[in-house]
Amino acid sequence: MACISLRAVSLAALAGILIPLAPSAFAQPTQVVRFLQNETDPPSIAFYNKAIAEFEKQNPDIKIEMESVSTDARLQKVTAALRAHTMPDVFKLLSEERVEFARKGYLVPLDGMISEIGEKDFVAGTLSRIDGHYYDVPYALNNFSVLWYRSDLLKAAGLQPPKNWDDLRAAAKALNKDGVNGFIFPAGQNRMTSLYLAMMMWSAGGTFFDKNLNVTFDNPGTIKALTFMKDMAQYSPKGLASYSYSDMINVYLTGKVGLDIYAARLIANAQQSVPKLAEQTSATLMPAGPAGVGVQFLSTNSYAIASPKAGAKHTEAAMKFLKFIVSGDRARDFALTAFPHMIPPIKSEQEAVLAAGKKTLNDRDDLGRTTFDVSNALDFDQEAGATFSDGKVVKSGVPNPYIGPIIARGIPAQVVQHVVLGGEDPAKAAAWGAAQMNAIVRDLKDR
């Protein structure tokens, strides 16, 4: 019996030694956080890969699975994921989706994160509350309304940088020769075309909706914008029928475009791939339209966290990762990946980014500061009921729950195509667009 007891004690002791060494005893289950983003340029991808590696090192129980897609592909991914209830945990949220997604319960509130980062340090107008809560956190601002121009061509033509639509038309006409197109704009069936029409319509005094959320798209401003775009098509490349975001850069980089209203990624890419062209390129503010102001389209790029209702699985881990990538040194490092395209939404970071970034543009401080001037700007979610007077934009402060599906279905882009490609009367096209928008609003109200 004594021998048996000794053996039992020995086995028990051995078990006591082995149990703590078993991998399952202390190992934490890995939480896989899915991350969907649309910054696809190589420097941006390199930034995210580095940041993810650093985060995973600090948090060995969390693994980040990143998927990078184009802006147009992102819409398809999100739409399909919502239908299947398989949303990624962290994802790029478009401004026009904010109200709808929040009210349908697809998003997790981020009030605590905004407070920890510092609510007052965000650029005015970049944070949006929906029913008293923040549901997304900005990581960069993009000014899509900088007028990039070939200073060498303007000088040769004896012209000054355009300050209004009349100047813009005259300059485009003068530069449209010797294999160079005077102007360029998108007319493809995509969000960029809708965006472009929006800033032209606002500059002409129109809006999609009034402050009571009635559709006002068939207004004189829309008709003026469409008429202007139809006129400018004669000075633009023939391929504009399919143009989207990247075409606004890539076609300019051929050296065969004189004037291009677009975001600052254009000059960042020019400096990297065609430095001689970058030297010949200058920037100025959006030319004023008939409303007396050049209304800029300021895209507030934000990330949101999907809720379990939408299919997300690891909310707390996602929250930890999101705060990591949008704050601290990462905020500044990301802004420098495509300077001056990525404007920091944190005010206290902007001067440091401007100082560091201008070195990449041969110390041309003017390029960064022109881009960082985001006064008189709107986005899809902020435009309802906006007014334009004395050279300024005044927002109504009314969030729009209807604009998202309208942009997602490409109604404004289709209107542009009706006019620019199909030759339709601008007033008739605007009326068609308004009817389509009203049908979408009625459908949303009936649900």
Image (cartoon, rainbow, N blue to C red):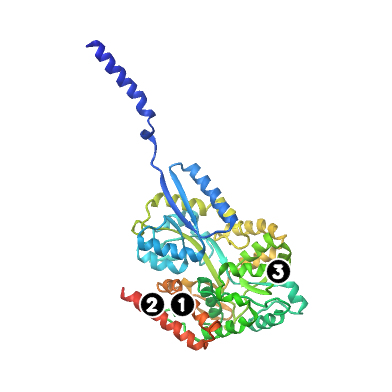
Q: Which residue is mark 2?
A: 440
Residue 97: image location, x then y, percent: 43, 67
Numbered tag placed on residue 282 in the rendering: none
SS label for mark 3 = strand
Task: Name the residue nearer the viewer: 414 or 338.
Answer: 414
The answer to which image quadrant residue 282 occupies is bottom right
Pointers 2 and 3 in contact (C-beta within 8 Å): no
Horizontal placement of 411 versus 183: left or right?
A: left
Numbered tag placed on residue 411 in the rendering: 1
Numbered tag placed on residue 281 in the rendering: 3
Pointers 1 and 2 in contact (C-beta within 8 Å): yes
Going from N to C along the chain, the mark reached first, 1 or 3, is: 3
Amino acid type indicated by mark 2: Ile
Amino acid type indicated by mark 3: Thr
Residue 130: image location, x then y, percent: 40, 66
The answer to which image quadrant residue 18 occupies is top left
